[in-house]
Image (spheres, rainbow, N blue to C red):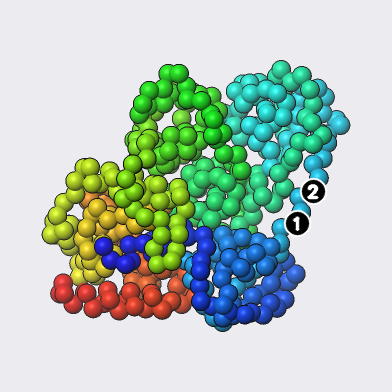
Amino acid sequence: MSARTSRPRTAARVATGTGATLAVATVALAASATGADAADYTVGEGDTLTAIAKRAGTTVARIAADNALADPSRVRVGQVLRLPDPAPAAAPAAAAPAAAPAGSYTVRTGDTVSAIATRHGTTVAAVVAANGLDRRAFIRAGQTLTIPGAGHAAPATAPVAAASTAGSYTVRTGDTVSAIATRHGTTVAAVVAANGLDRRAFIRAGQTLTIPGAGHAAPATAPVAAASTAGSYTVRTGDTVSAIATRHGTTVAAVMAANGLDQRASIRAGQTLTIPGSTAPSTQLVGNTFAGRTYATAVVDAANRNKATLLAAGVPSRATMQAKVAATARDMGVDPALAQAIALQESGFNHSAVSPANAIGTMQVIPSSGEWASDLVGRRLDLLNPDDNVVAGVAILRSLVRTSPDLPTAIASYYQGSASVQRNGMFADTRRYVANVQTLMTRFR
């Protein structure tokens, strides 16, 4: 497996690392010319992104998102970072509106049906039924809900989520759906569904997104329905695919694929779902660190499940995978030499390769990039399937070649991400990657 198999990227691979130990150093903080809501920070020798975030009163994920960093573990001396102002202290919770009579509640920004039901001593199912809500239980600020069986008003001390961190979010330059979902404690699939986004999850600066279920993880002690058996689960009112996947130690993508769900992941009470890979593998097949970067537990767990699945199913030989890459590239109008060079650099044509960043198979495509590739070709692609994996990688490569000013930029974008290349230029390791791929191309002419 090449060293590249663990490297996150923004377009062809999403960065998943959250912190970094870097050799970088002292810095200067200057007021941004853009206004008082942010500042420019020049990275100096000895700095780490973690230390910068702590000093600025923000988070690594926030800085990475605001600056479109492909790899939060890599900042360089002299690099200028845009830093947000520290989040204001949470305002004390306001008492429930005086105008709201017993048995009703006026929705405030940041509320969820789950939180409202808990606060009033009732259930999600009861609130949904009493107000004719759909399965996704959408509510909006200012809406008046009937609270069935509510014997008491909301406690005065009930916390209310700050408007800036739940319920809605205004997109800023450099944001991605993945970063927004992580920041608000929800999932990409939930944000996509709540806002009617397509599989590529395109967003634009200034757009206001609805953030569903932000900050409300499934309770660790949530019981499994009595009707559930190993490998299956019967959906109950109020369930979401995200909560079910978390409860069973699998992923949203895996549950969607196993049950033929569309990108909105709609489920209904009483439906029986197949739960794939509901038990984590006992053997750690994929580590959680590479080149000084440590990856999130959920990402590494998913990588281990995918690795175990590939090994259990068996994969084609390297020679067979090379032939698939060449044939697929010709069929899709991509230079076969380029596609083969990328595959060799990424995985050595080893389809069982899975990185700590959960980059899968011969073309080392992560699930979110697989969604993009699915949209590019007009059908859902299974990255564990050898043929679909190659189609995904070649489709991404074809798009990058068509939209990049030159071939080196397209190759760099497959590795570093096109947005990052446009914003930051090629990093030193990206330049080495491009040089390696161009050299490997001569082997396939």
Contact between marks 1 and 2 (CB within 8 A): the answer is: yes
Q: Is residue 179 visible?
A: yes
Q: Kindly state the secondary structure of the residue where label 2 is placed.
A: loop
- Callout 2: 10 Å neighbours few (<14), some, many (20+)? few
Amino acid of disc 2: Ala
Instruction: Kindly identify the residue that appears in the image at 51 percent across and 25 percent down.
Output: 223
* Quarter that holds the N terminus: bottom left
Percent position of residue 430, x then y: 38, 74
User: How many numbered callouts?
Assistant: 2
Instruction: Kindly identify the residue that appears in the image at 43 percent across and 41 percent down.
Output: 252
Where, by quadrant of the figure, is residue 394 drawn?
bottom left
Amino acid of disc 1: Pro
* Quarter that holds the C terminus: bottom left
Percent position of residue 23, x then y: 51, 76
- In the drawing, does residue 355 fall left or right of residue 79? left
- In the drawing, does residue 345 fall left or right of residue 220? left
Q: Residue under circle 1? A: 88
Q: Is residue 174 visible?
A: no
- In the drawing, does residue 63 fall left or right of residue 198? right
- Callout 1: 10 Å neighbours few (<14), some, many (20+)? few
Using the image, tell me which numbered label, if any, was put on residue 426.
Answer: none
Q: Is residue 151 above or below residue 389?
A: above
Where, by quadrant of the figure, is residue 255 drawn?
top left
The residue lying furthest to the right in this view is 98
Q: Residue under circle 2? A: 91
Percent position of residue 330, x then y: 19, 62
Instruction: Kindly identify the residue that appears in the image at 23 percent across and 54 percent down.
Output: 351
Q: Is residue 160 above or below residue 386?
A: above
Instruction: Kindly identify the residue that appears in the image at 52 percent across and 42 percent down.
Output: 190
Q: Kindly state the secondary structure of the residue where label 1 is placed.
A: loop
